[in-house]
Amino acid sequence: MDNHQSTTAKPKTAFLYTPDFEGFDYGPGHPLKSLRLRLTHDLIRAYGLLNLPDARELRPQPASEEELELFHSPEYLQALKNAEKGHAYHDYFVFGLGTGDNPIFQGMYTWSVLSAGASLQAARLVESGEVDCAFNIAGGLHHAGPAQASGFCYVNDPALTIRYLISKGYRVAYVDIDAHHGDGVQAAFYDTDQVLTVSFHETGETLFPGTGFVEELGKGKGEGYSVNVPLYPGSDDEIFLWAFQEVAPPLIRAFQPDILVTQLGVDTHRTDPLSHLELTIQGFGRLVEALRALSSKWVALGGGGYNLANVPRAWALAWGIMNGLNLPDQLPPDYMAISLRWGVAEDRLFDDPFPSTTSPIKKRALAYAREQVAKLRKMVFPRHGIRP
Amino acid sequence: MLVGKRMKRNPVTIDKDSGINEALRLLQEHRIRHLPVMDGEKMVGIVTDRDIRRVLPSPATSLEIHELNYLLDKLRIGEVMTKKVITVVPETTLEEAAKLLLDHKIGGLPVMDGEELVGIITETDILEVFLEVMGVRAPSSRIELIVEDKPGALEEACRIIKGYQGNILSVVTARATLLDEEKKVLVIRLEAPDFEPLIKALEGADYKVLSALV
């Protein structure tokens, strides 16, 4: 498209995608719909962002069992495989399987393994220097435990990816901007100083999984390497961006990671049905720009986002930023023709500006954010040699 | 019309450490389909009749009855509930709530005020509002008209009705998707002493009357 404007030098990038991502179905009544991935791909294509000179679209391969065992227990993987084939047992509840959040459905293992394979491939592309940034919109399933399905996630691809990278000797910073705390990833690296995890999310007081408080600092060698910034319902662009800038850049500069892994959930949006934060698409975009400034080697993963009108816009914008491009506000007619069929009537990339209010809700959210950031500076910053 | 005005306050809830049988009992006793799950004062999830049915073994199970009872006894609501819950606030509009129910094919939404569960709104509540909006709650006549989708089309029909001493109870307009893109369907509930002459007058004014029920 001719109206793209370059913001800086063009990085080399890769977009991992296969139509097989679209094949899974969590069942009626479940908010995670594969259509959001398809529409994102449609929008990115309609914007002309799949045939840029320095960007490649690549088809991911499923993760191997050996790779999955970097994080998950063999018993759990076997249970996933059995469940997918319809051989589920009542004791599968111990694995978190068969719940409202993590139903047993056909293709659940196949799909999870493909999503994880795409994240691992993204990591290999970045690690080898083939690209500066790789994006897997099907990844970011940050809640799963070694033997536990949780919060729509069966295989924890961020944890696997980071395990792979540290096994190669890299230092990894993980930044998670999903509305939900990245509990599975935090737990995976709670006792190591090779990985710095930083999660911004709606407070566990009001949202699943109920964790992610400032006091969760890590333990042993990992003390000070788990960082949590909980935010109160009603936190908007202004509050989220302020908290982000106060915390993420200084800590990551001090940590000096070789590679940055990010989880770019967009369920922080004001119209997302699952959370109570108030971000706009442009606010999300500014977070992605701020992340881009933190590292030249970047593995970007998807995450939550349950309003079909938002996910494609947010991740197309993110992919534009990864390629150093500004996108026009008017959504391409080719995309709108497709999205309208699914009842998505959005015609602009950006939201109307959300007025900065002085409502009691906003005041309470701002006071809460200030309190968390102050506590965090005091408890965590000195461990990284930064003045609180 | 906002959720806060139409929700059910003080919804029936269940503790996360309760068993499956307790959930079944509550659902049946109160004839409801959604139970917010509580950990003390805090809502931590939701279970529906669908979740419970999924947990109960199929009639074709190979398990012995005592094994089944043992498994069901051991299972806590906290293990089977949905933890990532779609919620609304009292200020959510009813149409937004209806859209959430429809888009996600669910039947109920807990209503939250910050950390506090203040109510629940279900498809039944939305249907009640729909009936009210359609004017069904009072005895009345009903006319369905096709009108041009242009300014003043509604006003003219109303003037004719007024001319026959008709008292309008409710008016609903909808896009006539099955007929013609340019036209609208008007559903009017009214009390009219001279119903037949009124219909003739509307037809005389070139309105297409789709149906008229005294």
Image (cartoon, coloured by chain):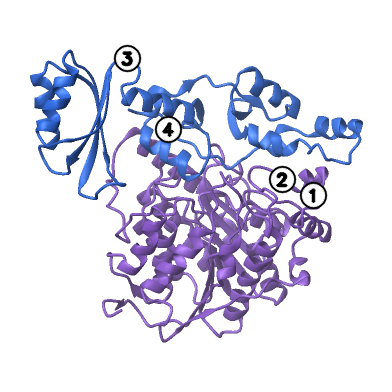
Chain colours: A purple, B blue
Mark 3 chain: B
Tell which tag, 3 or 4, sits nearer the viewer.
3
Residue B82, x across and y down, in percent: 62, 40
Residue identified by numbered label 1? A88
Numbered label attached to residue B89 = 4
Q: Amino acid at mark 2?
A: Gly
Image quadrant where residue B138 sits: top left
Tell which tag, 2 or 3, sits nearer the viewer.
3
Residue B24 appears anywhere in the view: yes
Q: Amino acid at mark 3?
A: Ala
Above or below residue B204? Residue A130 is: below
Tell which tag, 3 or 1, sits nearer the viewer.
3
| Residue occupying image coordinates x 79% and y 49% | A88
Asked if marks 1 and 2 touch (Cβ < 8 Å), the reply is yes
Image quadrant where residue A370 sits: top left
Measured Cα–Cα span from mark 4 to mark 1: 37 Å
Above or below residue A108? Residue A316 is: below
Q: Amino acid at mark 4?
A: Val
Instruction: Answer left or right for B64 relative to A54.
Output: right
